[in-house]
Amino acid sequence: MTIASNAVGSVVLVLAGFVIGGISLAGAAPGWLVVVSMAPSLIGFWWLARVRSARVEIHSDRLIAVGFLWTRTIRRSQVLMVIDDPSVPCVMWRSSIGIPVATFLTTVMTGELGASREGTARRKSFLDEVSRWAQH
């Protein structure tokens, strides 16, 4: 998904929450129902904020993946391998206590539907850069 489609999705959630919440208020619904009906709006606002800040940063000693749900900082010394397939890009790494972890780079993922030829080429080029970074 693109940032634009994620932004549209979050706006739809925000509007849906306001509509459902308004209907609940107009019908003199119990307070808990109004709060529950506003949940889509809260999720939509959170989603919109996270989508706009999602990114992958490469630094000399670490990679920072800011995703839609959480942020991971991975030291280069922890990286086991990089899967540079744009449909499922992933960094395989070992945690500080030795547990293997997979971090999917959702911000550069094309997904099953794919992306334009240019978009896929840009993603592949970036993933090649991540692979080279991991090998040094």
Image (cartoon, helix red, strand yellow):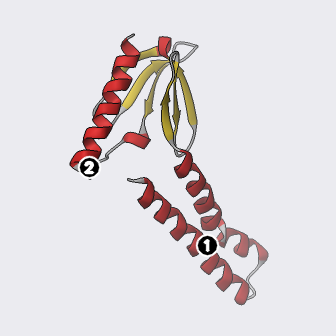
Q: Position of residue 88 (x, y in %)?
A: 32, 37
Q: Counting residues from the N terminus, which is met first, the one under dot 1 or under dot 2? A: 1
* Residue located beneath label 1 in the image: 17
Task: Examine the rendered structure and indicate whether residue 133 appears above or below residue 11.
Answer: above
Q: Position of residue 102 (x, y in %)?
A: 43, 28
Q: Is residue 74 left or right of residue 43?
A: left
* Residue located beneath label 2 in the image: 114
Task: Examine the rendered structure and indicate whether residue 66 appears above or below residue 128.
Answer: below
Q: CA distance from mark 1 to mark 2?
A: 30 Å
Q: Position of residue 99 (x, y in %)?
A: 51, 17
- Closer to us: mark 1 or mark 2? 2
Question: Few, some or many C-alpha atoms within 10 Å of disc 1 (few <14, some 14-19, many ≥20)?
Answer: many
Residue situated furthest left in the rendering: 117
**Point 35% across, 25% down: residue:** 129
Q: Is residue 86 visible?
A: no
Q: Secondary structure at mark 1?
A: helix
**Point 34% across, 21% down: residue:** 131
Q: Secondary structure at mark 2?
A: loop
Question: Few, some or many C-alpha atoms within 10 Å of disc 2 (few <14, some 14-19, many ≥20)?
Answer: few
Observer-nearest residue: 1 or 27?
A: 1
Q: How many marks?
A: 2
**Point 45% across, 19% down: residue:** 93
